[in-house]
Amino acid sequence: MNKRIKMIILALICSLTIVTTKVSAEGLSLSSPKVNITTSKEWTVKFNASLKTDTVNDKSITVKDENNKIVPVSVTMGKSSDTVVISPEVSGYEPNKKYNLIIGTDVQSTDGKKLSSPMEMQFTTNNKYEDGSNYENLQQIVSCKFQYSPLLSTQKQVFALNTNNGQDVEYRIFVHNYSLEKDSYTEVTNGYTKPSDGKITSTKTLDAGADGQKYKVLIYVKRSGNVGTHKDVNTDYDNYYVDYFRCINSADTNNNEYKNYDISVDQMVDIQTKLSDKSVFVETNDFNNAASKNQIKYYLDPNNFMDSNGKYQFLKLSYTDGMNVDQVNNILKGKGILDGKGQAFLDAAKNNNISIVYLISHSLLETGNGASLLANGGQKDSSGKYIFGAPVYNFFGIGAYDKDPNYYGTKAAYDNKWFTPEDAINGGAQWIASQYINNPNGKQDTLYKMRWNPSNPGEHQYATDVAWSYKQVPNMIKGITNILEQVKDIKLNFEIPKFK
């Protein structure tokens, strides 16, 4: 489907202004909001008169987000002197967001006439991340393979690329360091570059930070020797492609054991992308946007996380002695309703053969450090009464289905009779142990296996957030650091998946 949606501005010229009589987009009024717009959408606006090119720019025509902040888009003349093209911000708009396209009165016709008042159109993007644009009849990247996964901070990444329309193309590559602002991109090529044997080698090494660093790679492609049909603030292009890799300082092989699986990473990713309850990437607590294929691949591939930080996803989660109630309470101090519940966590961990560190980190993540609604009595009705007649507690997100997590999480707590915080801690631990960590039908005894279940991918997975297991790592490491400061001889065992 062609991503260029045309908006035709019909006007009557009167005196020194262009008086608008009708504005339409695909037969709809310009003032009518547009919904379910793809994040790579490019708008084309047609006027009834030729325009002064020096009045067509990102000052006279703007896009603003729902916070009224200007979004950096590219505004250029179209194929004719009466059309303007508004290209999306770098790598596309954010999913599930409202934007306003504003055509200001500084836009002038060639004889100096202006619009009598600004025109504005609201559009809302769909809730799906994309791995690039697919503008019709143009060169499009269909695959990217990284030579280094993960990338070491001493290496220059090599990109093996394929397009859908032959290889007489040029690429220009930028990367975004996730520790920096969203709009911060660094070029790793010297302008557009022709591939050698289908490969482009970065001109730069990248920073791994202290704990490993995620990078978003943005690859532009265009026909060799031609100006790209589209443009953003980085460059002209025919299409762009988005992928992700991780940079680390060194791999950590201490206490690693490996388990082989008769499936490839690509096969695992294909299964995940076909799930009816789509995998999601929860960038903030407010959104549940469908993850793109390459976002799934980044978090699913164990090779990205073989440093001393990332590999805690593969820590075995069975119970280990060595932590006392004071140490647990120190971790829980200031964590809302969890504060002071150290003994309950210790008892639940030991009775259910679950790592105390995992149990704590899981509850901190799911409850937002003890502050969530589910952790503090559950959902209430419009009159302020608890929907099941009494407060109930859910510290592990059990039963909190995405379609209405607060209702279903509250119902699960009520059905399981978790009427006190201690009930919720022990009952939740029992549920997790029986369903996952100590499940006799297939132990899912690492965070990674709970999320991805490589023995039976696509089935019995704990979370939909593709980053779920990695997001628990900071709390896991914090808890373990506290333990190791007190008990020096605890051995940590890691089980690393090996795919074919």
Image: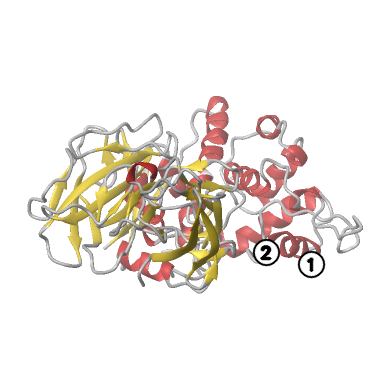
What residue is shown at x 33% (from left), y 60% (from top)? 133
What residue is shown at x 35% (from left), y 40% (from top)? 176
Q: Does 184 appear above or below 126?
A: above
Q: Are marks 1 and 2 in contact (CB under 8 Å)?
A: yes
Pick the residue in front: 306 or 98: 98
What residue is shown at x 27% (from left), y 41% (from top)? 151
Tell whether 24 sits left or right of 345: left
Amino acid type of disc 1?
Asp
| Residue 62 seen | yes
Q: Does 121 appear above or below 488?
A: below
Tell whether 302 sits left or right of 349: left
Could you tell which of marks 1 and 2 lies nearer the N-terminus? 2
- Looking at the rendered image, the quarter that the C terminus falls into is bottom left
Res 348 label = none
What residue is shown at x 67% (from left), y 58% (from top)? 430
Tell whether 492 sits left or right of 264: right
Using a 10 Å C-alpha cutoff, classify the residue at mark 1 as few (fewer than 14 neighbours), some (14 to 19) or many (20 or more).
few
Using the numbered discs, state the Cα–Cα distance from disc 1 to disc 2 in whole angstroms: 10 Å
Which image quarter: residue 144?
bottom left
Say which residue label 2 marks.
Answer: 399
Amino acid type of disc 2?
Gly
Pick the residue in front: 268 or 205: 205
Say which residue label 1 marks.
Answer: 415
Which image quarter: residue 321?
top right
Tell whether 327 sits left or right of 172: right
Pick the residue in front: 63 or 198: 63
Q: Position of residue 339 (x, y in %)?
A: 75, 36
